[in-house]
């Protein structure tokens, strides 16, 4: 004796499958728009030691660190370092999920080049100091 599901069960199962197949891509698209884990682009301008312009993305501020401002000691060194090593290169930006942009509208993120965390590299080279502004996805104290 074989058991057969009633016809209305089958219909509701199909309706459920259809709803699921429609909602999953929608959910992923929503999630993607909100989080956008990492975006790649070319460094088209180095604004200063901790701020770059990335094609297709905009102005990116290296999160978790700060390099000296114009007129302060170390400003030129940080600017030259970033220009020499990353200008024209394609980088991957991991946008800060907790604070995607700062108050100036700049994207906050960790910049990677060939797998190297550039934010951490600036710290290690003594060109930047930690600047931790919560909430942030990243903990710069774990980079050194
Ligand atoms: Ca992220
Ligand atoms: Ca700075």
Image (cartoon, rainbow, N blue to C red):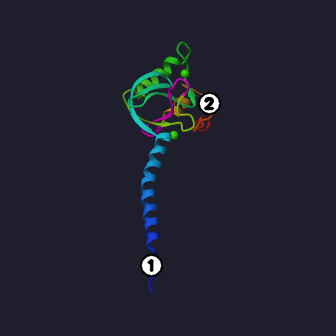
Front-lying residue, 122 or 28: 28
Does residue 128 lie above or below 26 as drawn?
above
One can see residue 90 in this view: no
Front-lying residue, 22 or 74: 22
Counting from the top left corner in percent of width and height, residue 28 is at 46, 48
Front-lying residue, 124 or 26: 26
Residue segment shown in magenta: 102-116
Residue 133, which numbered label?
2
Q: Residues within 10 Å of mark 2 (few under 14, many from 20)?
A: few
Counting from the top left corner in percent of width and height, residue 86 is at 41, 29
Q: Give the quadrant of the N terminus.
A: bottom left
**Position of 102 compared to 18: left or right?**
right
The single residue placed furthest to the bottom in the displayed view is 1
- Which image quarter: residue 142? top right
**Mark 1 lies within 8 Å of ligand 1 (Cβ measured):** no
Counting from the top left corner in percent of width and height, residue 114 is at 42, 38
């Amino acid at each position: 004796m074989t058991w057969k599901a009633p016809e209305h069960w089958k219909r509701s199962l199909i309706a459920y499958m259809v709803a699921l197949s429609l909602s999953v891509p929608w959910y992923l698209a929503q999630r993607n728009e909100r989080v956008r884990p990492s975006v790649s682009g070319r460094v088209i301008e180095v604004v200063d030691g901790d701020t770059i312009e990335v094609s297709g993305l905009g102005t990116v501020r290296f999160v978790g660190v700060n390099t000296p401002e114009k007129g302060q000691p170390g400003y030129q060194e940080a600017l030259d370092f970033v220009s020499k090593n990353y200008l024209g290169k394609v980088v991957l930006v991991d946008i800060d999920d907790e604070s995607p942009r700062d108050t100036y509208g700049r994207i906050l993120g960790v910049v990677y080049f060939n797998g190297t965390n550039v934010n951490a590299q600036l710290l290690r080279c003594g060109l930047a100091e930690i600047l931790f502004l919560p909430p942030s996805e990243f903990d710069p104290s774990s980079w050194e």
